[in-house]
Amino acid sequence: MNWIGLNTLIKREVGRFFSVYRQTVLPGLISSTLYIMIFGFTLEQRIAEIQGIPYTLFILPGLIMMNTLTNATANTSSSMLQMKLLQQLPDLLTAPLSGLEISIAYIIGGTIRGLVNGILVLLLGVFLIDMPVIDPLGTLGFIFLVSWAFASMGLFLGQLAENWDQLAMMQNFFLTPLSFLGGVFYSIKMLPEWAQNLSLINPIYYMINGIRYTVLGVSDSSVMISVFMAIILTLIFTFAAILLMQSGKKIKH
């Protein structure tokens, strides 16, 4: 393992998104604040509680998870596609770094961005609406696990995409709809039975329920299923991204 090269690439990826924090960090905080004000404070007048939890508090864990997974995915997918379009990835592969080391560095960079954005929205909830956090360590651990899972998915998608339109299509037709249909703003128990059954095949539903349990202590499904799903997603997309990188396919634009 080339630790020096790995560390250098990780620092570059982390420095890249921190250098443009107005695009990578602030939008999540601003959008979450608007969601709290518009959906939370407004709809709470009509929906006082869900499962004994005030509505504004109920939606906060979903906002944490939505910001975590979208930022983790965006970081690795955009960075990888940019390297491909600029024809820099083949040069990187000629450096004394293996496909495994390159993949891990990109995934760690995306994981850190997802973790940072998730924690910031968590702190926003704590300080803005006095949100309790029942299991702080479990919450941070779950945010980290989901960040890694979706950072690896983003790396995989970034390798598959040939241009920005393809990448946007993958995200807009997969990530965004599944996030909103995953129970961010509602409990699936409020849905008709057929819609509840449909929600159960949505992986993001389990991510949102997992974080809602560690923060508020309530969930529509078993937290163990959420942890299991997060681990499965992590393993599948990590190995898929690494194997695709090592194969050298989809490298040149």
Image: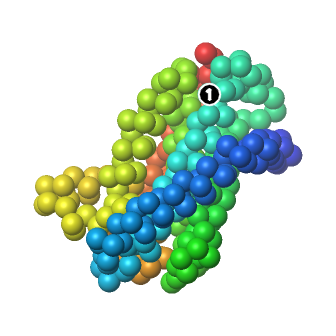
Residue occupying image coordinates x 47% and y 68%: 60
Query: Quadrant location of the C terminus?
Result: top right
Residue occupying image coordinates x 58% and y 36%: 77
Left or right, 242 with respect to 189, comes to right
Q: Is residue 154 above or below residue 235?
A: above
Q: Is residue 228 visible?
A: no
Q: Tag 1's secondary structure?
A: helix
Would you identify the image quadrant in which residue 78 lies? top right
Percent position of residue 5, x then y: 83, 41
Judging from the image, the colouring scheme is rainbow
Percent position of residue 120, x then y: 64, 64
Left or right, 251 with respect to 40, comes to right
Q: Is residue 39 above or below residue 57?
A: above
Outermost residue, left side:
193
Residue occupying image coordinates x 26% and y 57%: 200
Would you identify the image quadrant in which residue 128 lies? bottom right
Q: What number of labels is visible?
A: 1
In this figure, which residue is indicated by the disc labeled 1? 81
Residue occupying image coordinates x 67% and y 52%: 25
Kind of residue sitting beneath label 1: Leu
Percent position of residue 226, x then y: 39, 65
Outermost residue, top side:
253
Which class describes the residues within 10 Å of circle 1: few (<14), some (14-19), or many (20+)?
Answer: many
Q: Is residue 46 visible?
A: yes
Relative depth, front residue between 89 and 248: 89
